[in-house]
Image: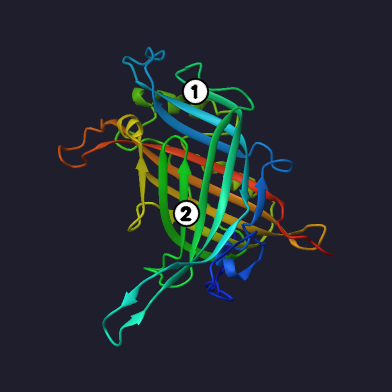
Amino acid sequence: MKETKTMRTEPAKLENKKRRLEPPKTNDQELGPLKLLPGKWANLPGLPGRGWNMIALPFVAPPPPGVPFPLNYRLLLHQYNEELEFTLVDKAVPNRGIRLAPGTPANTDQFLVALDYQQRIRQIAGDDFPKSGLAGSPGDVIHHEPGLWLHMINGVTEGLNIGRLATIPHGDSVLALGRSSEHSGAQSIADISGLPIGVDQDLNNPYLAPYKHFNDNLFQGLFNPVSPNDLLEAANEGVEVEKTTVLDVDSTLPTGGVVNIPFIVRQANATVVKSTFWIQELKEKDKYGKPKLRLQYTQLVMLDFFPRVDNLPPGCCPGLIQWPHVSINTLEKVVDPEPKTK
């Protein structure tokens, strides 16, 4: 991919500081780096089946063929279609504060804009190894998530100007903070490993038999859980991108975090959430002469369960095995919230 130029990004400028709820509009400058999100994004009709998901889960089953011991987990994969909708904006949300020193005491209120979202995902296909009979059927709902994207207009700490608040019905709540950036052209998508941390990562290790199974037999002939971001790069082949806005958030940054109900903590504790969104303005235009919009994302959730088995020196790396739960997708804007005119 050819080199791109990072562009200067400006924070949103509020027309007034009176808090208000309203339907969002695309390209509303008061939304800052979130300004292209309002509306509805989806796989259908133009990008069907671009969503992929992998997750390791505790599961009791007999050892798979060739494995001399029970694994006590299964690797579950999904192909899916998604709808991601942004329908309400809360503007000029105030956080009250003061500065007493140095200098003259002053009020230092912070203002945010918050953009509501609803995410709905239905599976196209599912498979797991070892087989459980629980991989689901086409059309099954596999995820629902209400949440907020935040843009901190002022009072920013260490350049952290965006945040994502997510609430997941399994019993998880996430605050991930991060930074936005704008770039000319498309952005390269970094490789990530889907292999668990805290085990010998040689695919010939019998403990990794589920990963080797899908590495040797790609799910749906396409998805490899060992390198789950590959299909994001493939989706960009032949696509000309004029400009990319990047939203990169991480729950491990200061004051972020993940909170879960007790059962989740005991069984498969979600401890880390990292996600990157790439909002692409294409050179291809829609029927109104505006750039077509695509949205790509990769999300990594670390699930912690089972003691480490990587045979490192005692005390080196305490804790549990971390199992990457990765979701990727490429969507297009299908509904714009504001009327379009020629």
Location of residue 342 with respect to 327 vertically, above or below: below
Q: Which quarter of the image is occupied by the C terminus? A: bottom right
The crowding category of the residue bearing disc 1, from other C-alpha atoms within 10 Å (few below 14, some 14 to 19, many at least 20), is many
| SS at circle 2 | strand
- Label tally: 2
Q: Are marks 1 and 2 in contact (CB under 8 Å)?
A: no
Q: Nearer the viewer, residue 162 or 77?
A: 162
Q: Residue 214, percent across and down?
A: 50, 27
The crowding category of the residue bearing disc 2, from other C-alpha atoms within 10 Å (few below 14, some 14 to 19, many at least 20), is many
Name the residue beneath numbered marker 1.
128
Location of residue 129 with respect to 280 vertically, above or below: above
Residue at x-position 68% and y-position 56%: 293
Closer to the chain start, of discs 1 and 2, is 1
Residue at x-position 59% and y-position 32%: 79
Location of residue 308 with respect to 182 vertically, above or below: above
Q: Seen in the image, is 218 located left or right of residue 301?
A: right
Three-letter amino acid code of the residue under disc 1: Asp
Q: Residue furthest bottom?
A: 104
Q: Nearer the viewer, residue 191 or 245?
A: 245
Residue at x-position 69% and y-position 42%: 47
Name the residue beneath numbered marker 2.
164
